Image (cartoon, helix red, strand yellow):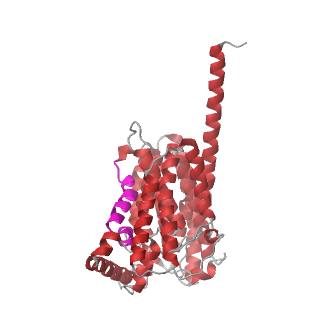
Amino acid sequence: MKPPSLALDGGASELTTRVRSTDTTLGALAVIALFIMLVAPTRFFFIPFTYEGNYLSVAPPNLIDLVWLGLAAALYSRSGHPSPWPPLTLAGLLILGATVIALSDVAVPEVMIDLVTFNTRLIGGLVLGILLARAGIPAGLLVSTLVVGITVIGMSTIVLAGGRGPSYDFYTQIRRYGGMGLGPNEAAMFFAGTFNMLPLVFRRRPWLSLALPVLLTALLLTGSRTGVLIAAAGVSLWVPAAASSARGAKRVALWIAVIVVAALAAWAGFVLIRDLWNRDVIAPVASSVAPSPDESTTGRLEIYSAVPTYLWQHLGVLLAGVGASNAAVEWTLQNVLSLETYHTHDLFLQFLTAYGIAGLFLAGVLVFPLLRRRDRYPDEDALGLRWFGLTLVAGQLIQYGLFEVKFLLIFTMIAGFLMAGTRRNRPGSEV
């Protein structure tokens, strides 16, 4: 018979092994779920319910909702603790929206559907990110999955621009290309965000920089001025990355290999873009930044003038919003303000219009985790996620993207992850 101390040691060792096995399984599950969320094609967002109405903001419950809800349930069973704040916040938003809709002239079912689905995904994405952090999922795992998944999206953008794929007919109408459930502007923010994230994680994961040629080629094919500008600003992030990484013969050899592969891929991308440009398949980004006014710029200026004026003249709307959903904002813009658009092209203005004053606090909850001091982030991977999120925020100052399910879930998940992963641990804190 074993001595009691040895028996206890054996039990502890077995328990530790089981815990590690569970953590590994959860990590693998998180990677698979996140990857599915990133690369899911458009049709997955309309299974099992199809929608062919006029509201572009509406996405009914779908397979991707099952993916993130299943992951959240698994994470909660492992490391979650009861907290009243998520259900209370969701209930408050739903009550606010339902009350405003009941007292207004909005009588379309899409508004009520989007009230439930959008706010559930908004709060659910935040909770999912918090649970990922509390479960000990490393930021580096999220970084690698994001880069690989968004690179796949970039490849689909290139394929669509080349004239292949089921969505090609739609994209040729505007000669700008998104991919895998994302429109051109939203895809461009993902590409630019990944480009700005890579220098922060280069020292630990230099192999991820091999995705740069695909990302930049796809970014140009989106024809998005916003994406190109915020990626150009992110070039400065590569200077400190290069200074801190090029040390020793191994690093120099790695840099040479990365530069050679990137140059070859960039050359191939250049040839592709030049060919598509010569065949008039893509809309040149240069034409979008010409000095003469274009429809996109004048449309935004009209929105930025009309919407604040309307809110100021209707204090009830300013206080309580138009229905706490994207579809309610879309209905108001088109039927009340006679604007041919389905969102306000600005994150803060969209939330102010949807929720009233409460929308500014809600937007602040999403953005604040990205604005903390550098020393509040535990490692370079978390800093990389921060810059990815900041890029999405910068893009949404003139282009709103949370009406797309994929964009909404990824953005809120990162905000929640950094919210839980950067604050100082406090005794008795709950998630």
Residue 2 lies, in percent from the top left, at 70, 13
Residue 212 lies, in percent from the top left, at 53, 60
> In the picture, residue 355 is in which quadrant?
bottom left
Q: Nearer the viewer, residue 343 or 50?
A: 50
Quadrant location of the N terminus? top right
The reply to whether the magenta stretch includes residue 87 is no
Q: Nearer the viewer, residue 107 or 413?
A: 107
Residue 280 lies, in percent from the top left, at 56, 84
Q: Nearer the viewer, residue 276 or 164?
A: 164
The reply to whether the magenta stretch includes residue 368 is yes
Visible residue check, residue 339 = no
> In the picture, residue 297 is in which quadrant?
bottom left
Residue drawn where x is 54% and y is 80% of the image: 282
Residue drawn where x is 61% and y is 45% of the image: 26
Q: Is residue 213 above or below residue 220?
A: above
The residues colored magenta run 345-373
Q: Is residue 198 above or below residue 219?
A: above
Question: Residue 373 vs residue 85: left or right?
Answer: left
